[in-house]
Amino acid sequence: MDESSSPSLLYAVKQVEQVVRARLDAVLRPHGATALQYTALTVLQHRDGMSSAELARNAFVRPQSMADLVSALESRRLVVRVKDAADRKRINVMLTDEGRAFLSACEAEVADLERTMLRDLTDHQVKVLRSALNSCRRSLA
């Protein structure tokens, strides 16, 4: 197929995102979580103690949606909200031990999903893809 008749890259990225989200939801469903909840927890795993608004930006959801999402995670004791000692108006969202255990329980299945997605690519192609996607994200940020 020639390049002019191929879907746009934006369309291809969106298709990949939708398939990944559906497959990730299927992997996480037995654990009682969604892809959005998992994403928020992994963001906290790398940068614990964000405000709900910061977490929303980093997890790619609207602040209003994040408030509901944090409430759901808090009810499962996967996160807690803690007043910031330096700024009493700020509430930080913190990953709990239960949240860390949840992420550990999902780790192998999520890694398998990523391996499946990348199985037809060489290590070099994976490195180039990661770099290209990060560059695209930075360009649009």
Image (cartoon, rainbow, N blue to C red):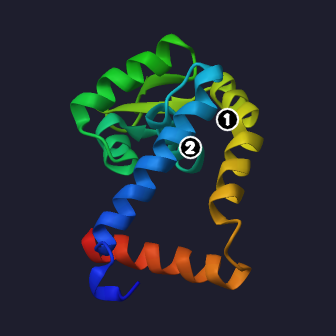
Q: Is residue 57 left or right of residue 124?
A: left
Give the residue drawn at x 73%, y 28%: 101
Q: Is residue 65 left or right of residue 116?
A: left
Coordinates of residue 8 in the picture (x, y in percent):
28, 74
- Can you see residue 89? no
Q: Nearer the viewer, residue 83 or 12?
A: 12
In the image, 92 versus 118, the foreground residue is 118
Q: Quadrant of the N terminus?
A: bottom left
In the image, what residue occupies the spot 31% across and 48% down? Answer: 57
Which is nearer the N-term, disc 2 or disc 1?
Answer: 2
- Which label sits on residue 103? 1
Q: For the point 38% across and 42% down, which residue is it?
A: 55
Q: What is the quadrant of residue 133 in the picture?
A: bottom left
Q: Is residue 139 above or below residue 20?
A: below
Residue placed most toward the observer, 59 or 18: 18
Q: Is residue 79 left or right of residue 118?
A: left
- Residue 129 visible in the picture: yes
Q: Is residue 42 above or below residue 30?
A: below
Q: Secondary structure at mark 2?
A: helix
Residue 25 numbered tag: none
Question: Which residue is at 75% across, 31% downward?
Answer: 105
Tell me the amino acid under the disc marked 1. Leu
Determine contact: label 2, label 1, CB under 8 Å.
yes
- Point out residue 79 in the picture as x, y percentages from the top left corner: 53, 24
Q: Position of residue 44 (x, y in %)?
A: 52, 42
Q: Which residue corresponds to mark 2? A: 42
The crowding category of the residue bearing disc 2, from other C-alpha atoms within 10 Å (few below 14, some 14 to 19, many at least 20), is: some
Name the kind of residue labelled 2 in the image: Thr
- Separation of residues labelled 2 and 1 (CA atoms): 8 Å
